[in-house]
Image (tube, rainbow, N blue to C red):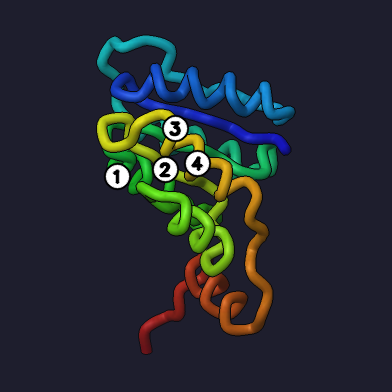
Amino acid sequence: MKIAIASDHAAVDMKAALANWLRESGHEVTDLGADSKDSVDYPDYGYALAEHVAAGKAERGVALCGTGIGISIAANRHSAIRCAVVTEPFSAQLARDHNDANILALGERILGLEMAKACLKAFIETESGSGERHARRIGKLTHPPVEA
């Protein structure tokens, strides 16, 4: 699977570890930065990751910052992105199954590396759920109904 990964300065260590783990697991990984602990703005990396995934250059994305929250907000600004912040594997699984999440957000200050790997494994291995109710709801995430 082609997977893009991006972080701000607060999560470069976890990003590097997860990127290596993904490569060792046989995935093609594109690292979109950041590359050091020098302070950067997480929205820049969230936007870049969202554009990369939305353009079809990666099947899934992984967004990291201190909590996962800020970078997920940035990624979710793109209408083609459904980014979910998770802290355990069951939520990662449901994000894929029920919401067709295409980017997973994790927080280095929140999760240990092994839990992050477990979340990412569940995210990668779970296919999007089938069924009309999920498809209808996912469609509304991409194209919200217009208020009358």
Q: Amino acid at mark 2?
A: Ala
Q: Amino acid at mark 3?
A: Glu
Query: At 57% from the left edge and 42% from the top edge, which residue is drawn?
Result: 121
Q: Which residue is mark 1?
A: 69
Reply above or below: 144 against 82: below
Q: Earlier in the sequence, mark 1 or mark 4?
A: 1
- Rendered location of residue 7, percent (x, y): 41, 27
Q: Taking 69 as reference, is 140 above or below it? A: below
Cβ atoms under marks 3 and 2 closer than 8 Å: no
Q: Residues within 10 Å of mark 1 (few under 14, many from 20)?
A: some
Q: Which residue is pictured at 52% across the width and 77% down the height?
A: 137
How far, Cα to Cα, is label 4 from label 3? Answer: 6 Å
Instruction: Please indicate, yes or no, whether residue 54 appears anywhere in the rendered image.
Output: no
Q: Are marks 4 and 3 in contact (CB under 8 Å)?
A: yes
Which numbered mark, 1 or 3, is in the foreground of this view?
A: 3
Residue that badge 2 annotates: 105
Secondary structure under the numbered disc 4 in the rendered image? helix
User: Of circles 3 and 2, which is in front?
Assistant: 3
